[in-house]
């Protein structure tokens, strides 16, 4: 491999699109908490720490998953030889160190969330990924907690708690559907994921039930008075997309999990719109 191919492979390990998307989540959490303008340096540190941590988590996941990826994702950096397993591990450790350094500048609550999440990222693939439902739940917590992390960075987690719960439910659903999509490689590797343990149809039924719970809970920020009608105008289409995606997953898990992601991002946007409408000057 040339130096250019190796650099490209290293960048691929981080999943740049996922890093950018994940880095937006603590910003949203801070915005929902109303602290972006009051403490921009803390928000920037939370965003950067999340980006480093997600990149590190993706790299170490590829390190542990290299044999599975030879079956499911042979074009990834390690299976195709662009990056060695040892190189991927070293790169992930550098990124983890960067995330820790940034987290140390934040308030105690945010630092505690960062510490828990860094341990969870490392433990996920090696200890939890192959356990039915537990690995999925851990990933769901990690995604949802990025909103809490951003809110904690500016000192107010209140409104972001609801966002954390809804994001975790939607992510858990998507992770189950992704396990259905990857069932052949996981079975070959001897993993005992939820679809393998209970069957694909039962796993998809559980995923659909979770979406129903999440959709039913989505009006809570409006009912609690956090946000007004503007929030509902955006969250209702997001709910519709996620419900359709859950239904679609029974026929096409790949398309279903992709559409679930779109619905999740739209739901996060609903919180941004809801907060912006609350803070917008009267008569604007």
Image (cartoon, helix red, strand yellow):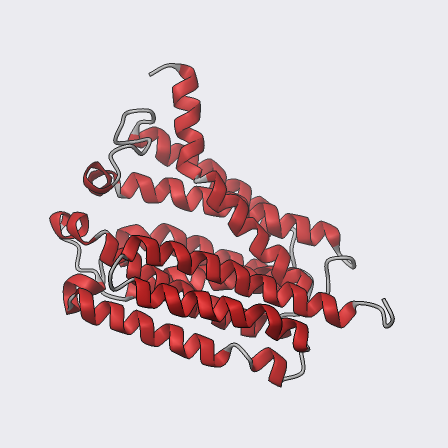
Q: Locate the N terminus by quadrant.
A: top left
Which residue occupies the extreme top position in the image? 2
Coordinates of residue 190 in the picture (x, y in percent):
13, 52
Give the answer, above or below, for where 83 lies relative to 176: above
Q: Residue at x 65, y 51 (%)?
A: 105
Position of 18 compared to 230: left or right?
A: left
Coordinates of residue 5 in the picture (x, y in percent):
39, 20
Coordinates of residue 127 in the picture (x, y in percent):
27, 56
Q: Locate the C terminus by quadrant.
A: bottom right
Residue 235 in view here:
yes
Position of 276 compared to 205: left or right?
A: right
Q: Residue at x 19, y 54 (%)?
A: 183
Q: Residue at x 25, y 64 (%)?
A: 250
Q: Quadrant of residue 275?
A: bottom right
Give the answer, above or below, for where 36 lies relative to 91: below
Residue 108 in view here:
no
């Amino acid at each position: 491999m040339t130096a250019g191919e190796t650099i490209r492979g290293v960048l691929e390990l981080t999943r740049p699109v996922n890093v950018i998307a994940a880095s937006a989540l603590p910003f949203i959490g801070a915005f929902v908490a109303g602290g972006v303008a009051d403490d921009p340096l803390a928000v920037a540190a939370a965003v950067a720490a999340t980006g480093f941590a997600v990149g590190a988590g993706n790299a170490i996941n590829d390190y542990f998953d290299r044999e599975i990826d030879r079956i499911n994702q042979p074009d990834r950096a390690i299976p195709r030889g662009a990056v060695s397993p040892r190189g991927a591990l070293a790169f992930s450790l550098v990124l983890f160190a960067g995330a820790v350094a940034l987290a140390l500048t934040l308030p105690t609550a945010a630092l505690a969330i960062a510490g828990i999440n860094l341990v969870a990222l490392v433990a996920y693939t090696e200890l939890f990924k192959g356990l039915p439902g537990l690995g999925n739940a851990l990933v769901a917590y990690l995604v949802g907690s990025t909103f809490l992390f951003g809110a904690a960075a500016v000192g107010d987690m209140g409104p972001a708690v609801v966002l954390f719960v809804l994001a975790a439910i939607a992510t858990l659903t998507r992770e189950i559907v992704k396990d259905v999509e990857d069932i052949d490689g996981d079975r070959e590797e001897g993993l005992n994921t939820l679809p393998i343990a209970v069957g694909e149809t039962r796993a998809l039924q559980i995923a659909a039930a979770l979406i129903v719970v999440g959709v039913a809970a989505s009006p809570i920020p409006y009912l609690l008075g956090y946000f007004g009608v503007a929030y509902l105008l955006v969250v209702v289409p997001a709910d519709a997309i996620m419900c359709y995606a859950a239904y679609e997953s029974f026929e096409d898990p790949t398309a279903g999990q992709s559409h679930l992601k779109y619905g999740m991002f739209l739901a996060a946007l609903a919180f941004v719109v809801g907060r912006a409408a609350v803070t917008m000057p009267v008569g604007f």
